Image (cartoon, rainbow, N blue to C red):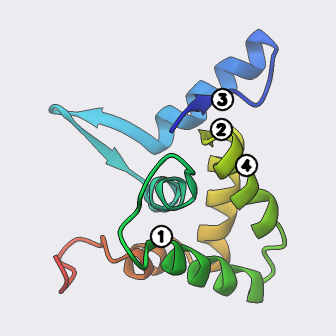
């Protein structure tokens, strides 16, 4: 998956990098991610045409997006198209943040993607 900036100005690129750093922070040799970043990684993998995701992963991403749509998120098609064509970017991260808010916030999103700390499926 590629990472690209949504803005071609130096200040826009710095803002994009700051946003990405806020949601993907490296600590002790691994990355800590916010719920939005975790969803973005999952959805990015599910929609990347060069990948072969685990069966059911794309369907799970679609279920999460459908729930967000029911709560008012109206850009699912744009989000999935950008993921398939561009990959992970500051723009898709902003959209993943909106999806996370629409489904009820960080705890709800972690539960939906089943990566919450102490989740029964881990």
Circle 1 crowding by C-alpha within 10 Å: few under 14, some 14–19, many from 20? some
Could you say whether the residue bearing mark 4 is in a helix, strand or loop? helix
Cβ atoms at labels 2 and 1 below 8 Å apart = no
In the rendered structure, which disc, 2 or 1, sits on the residue that comes first in sequence?
Answer: 2
Task: Please determine whether, in this image, residue 63 is positioned above or below residue 19.
Answer: below
Check contact, mark 4 vs mark 1: CB within 8 A.
Answer: no
- Residue linked to disc 3: 16
For disc 2, the neighbor class at 10 Å (few under 14, some 14 to 19, many from 20) is: many
Question: Which residue: 84% across, 72% down?
Answer: 74
Q: Which image quarter holds the C terminus?
A: bottom left
Q: Earlier in the sequence, mark 2 or mark 3?
A: 3
What residue is rendered at 65% in x and 50% in y?
A: 83
Disc 1 secondary structure class: helix
Q: Position of residue 8 (x, y in %)?
A: 81, 17
Query: In the rendered image, which residue does mark 1 sit on?
Result: 106
Q: Is residue 32 left or right of residue 110?
A: left
Q: What's the CA distance linking mark 4 and mark 3?
A: 16 Å
């Amino acid at each position: 998956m590629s990472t690209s900036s949504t803005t071609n100005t130096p200040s826009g690129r710095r803002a994009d990098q700051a946003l990405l750093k806020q949601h993907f922070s490296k600590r002790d040799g691994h990355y800590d991610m916010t719920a939005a970043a975790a969803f973005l990684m999952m959805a990015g993998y599910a929609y990347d045409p060069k990948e072969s995701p685990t069966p059911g992963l794309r369907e799970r991403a679609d279920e999460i997006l459908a729930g967000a749509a029911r709560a008012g998120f109206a850009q699912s098609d744009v989000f999935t198209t950008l993921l398939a064509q561009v990959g992970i970017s500051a723009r898709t991260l902003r959209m993943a943040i909106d999806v996370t808010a629409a489904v009820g916030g960080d705890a709800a999103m972690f539960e939906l993607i089943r990566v919450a700390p102490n989740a029964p499926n881990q």
